[in-house]
Image (cartoon, rainbow, N blue to C red):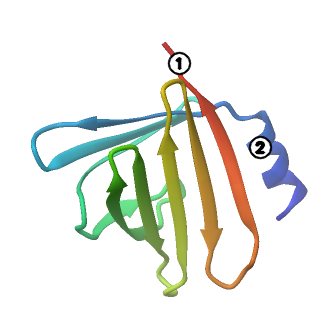
Amino acid sequence: MSENILQMLNSSTPTFCFTQIDGSTYNYCLESNGRVNTHDFKLGEEHEVARRDGSKVMVTYTLESENVLSQVIRQPDGKQSYFRRVFGDKETTMTIRMDGTDIEAKIYYELAE
C-alpha cells in the first residue's frame, strides 16, 4: 500500500451508519473527509454501487448473526474484498480481507453520539 493511502487512512475519521428502512431494506451511509457515500440494499442481494472515484462494483451484504454484518465487494476484474463488521455496545470492529493476499486489516470504530 502506498504511503499516500496509508497517510489518508491514518488521518481520516470516517463516520458510518446502517439504518433499517423497512423489513428487508437497509441504508448504508459513510461520511469521510467531507464526502458522503450512501446506498440502499437488501440482505443477500447483490447490487451495483458507485465508488467515490466513479467506478462501479457489485456488493452483497449478509447478516451472520444479530450483531455481525458481512459485506462482499466484487471488483470489475472479478477479485473480491471481504468486510466483516462486529457491532458491540459502544464499538464496532471491521475486518478486511482481499483476494490474492494473506493480509488482514482491522479497523476499530467508537460509537459517536
SS state under label 2: helix
Q: CA distance from mark 2 to mark 1?
A: 21 Å
What is the quadrant of the N terminus in the image? bottom right
Q: Residue furthest left?
A: 23
Residue at the disc numbered 2? 8
Q: Identify the residue position indicated by label 1 in the image.
A: 112
- Residue pictured at 23% horizontal, 44% vertical: 26
The residue depicted at 31 percent of the width and 67 percent of the height is 48
* Left or right, residue 110 beside residue 55: right
Rendered residue at 11%/39% (across/down): 22
**From this viewpoint, which residue is outermost toward the top?**
113
Q: From the image, state whether disc 2 or disc 1 is nearer to you.
A: 1
Against 34, residue 40 (above or below) is below
Q: Is residue 33 visible?
A: no
User: Is 98 located above or below residue 50 in the figure?
Assistant: below
Residue 42: % across, % down: 20, 56
Q: Residue furthest front?
A: 65
**Residue 101 picture quarter:** bottom right
Instruction: From the top left corner, tell me how far across and down residue 92 is, in percent.
Output: 55, 37
Q: At which x and y percent is residue 110?
A: 60, 26
Query: Residue type at mark 2?
Result: Met
